[in-house]
Amino acid sequence: MVMRSAELETRREKAKQIAAGLKKRNIEGFYCQNKEEALKLVLDMVPDGASAGWGGSVTLKQIGLFDGLREKGCVLHDMDEAGGDPEKAREIYLQSVGDDYFFMSTNGITEDGELVNIDGQGSRLSRMIFGPRNVVIIAGINKISPDVQSAVKRIRNEVCPVLAVAGGRNTACSNLGRCGNCFTPDSMCCEFVITRKSRQNGRMKVILVGEELGY
Ligand code: SF4
């Protein structure tokens, strides 16, 4: 989706309000104008040599997070390095659960600040919920939806079809271009997680970026 400038401005204002409102959810909210500002904010937060993992995310690649972390000498736990070996992936996952930082985007965020996510195997969302000491979530303004219901609808009908085609997955949405409520082995819609608040003080941070990032 490419937004018109009026829509971009409206969403940027909403993103600022959402970031400010996250305090009631015990989540630290930040607003950055662009991905360069977001990258600087993140790299200033993370101490040199910290351990870090992440959940698969186009957004994180777009902001250049991984090169930045490497330059800081961080110890990285990247499940993609398992190369499809489930035992190796499990080993990296278990290391990552104990990391100082976990990075991800969110599939959606509501105007009231709820985080809306859908996972296939759940390795991303399990680490978001518990384990790593800090969770940093970075999302573009295209991820904003009015409420949970419309966020889920957007994810299943607009995001999943793109991800299914890109990942070569055999799902109904890869053929239909919208959700067909499939139960195929490749279905990405196994775990639905709505984050209402964080119980652990200072653990969760959300950085909203005034650009379109990811899907
Ligand atoms: S349920 Fe199946 S068809 Fe619907 S979005 Fe999820 S993976 Fe795609």
Image (cartoon, rainbow, N blue to C red):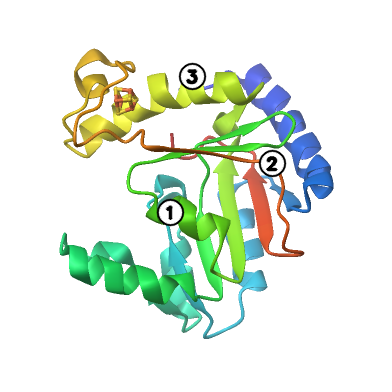
Q: Marks 1/3: CA distance?
A: 20 Å
Mark number displayed over residue 170:
none
Which amino acid, by three-letter code, is at mark 1? Arg
At label 3, counting other C-alpha atoms closer than 10 Å, the crowd grade (few under 14, some 14-19, many 20 or more) is some
- Quadrant that contains the N terminus: top left
| Above or below, 48 relative to 114 | below
What residue would you read off at disc 3? Answer: 153
> Considering the numbered disc 1 on the image, is that residue within a helix, a strand or a loop?
helix
Residue under the image location 19 percent in, 36 percent down: 185
Q: Where residue 62 sits in the image (x, y, percent)?
A: 43, 50
Q: Where residue 68 sits in the image (x, y, percent)?
A: 48, 70
> Considering the numbered disc 2 on the image, is that residue within a helix, a strand or a loop?
loop
Q: Where residue 182 sits in the image (x, y, percent)?
A: 26, 22
Q: Is residue 77 among the parts visible in the rendering?
A: no
What residue would you read off at disc 1? Answer: 124
Residue under the image location 71 percent in, 28 percent down: 111
Q: Marks 2/3: CA distance?
A: 18 Å
Q: Where residue 149 sits in the image (x, y, percent)?
A: 58, 20
Which amino acid, by three-letter code, is at mark 3? Lys
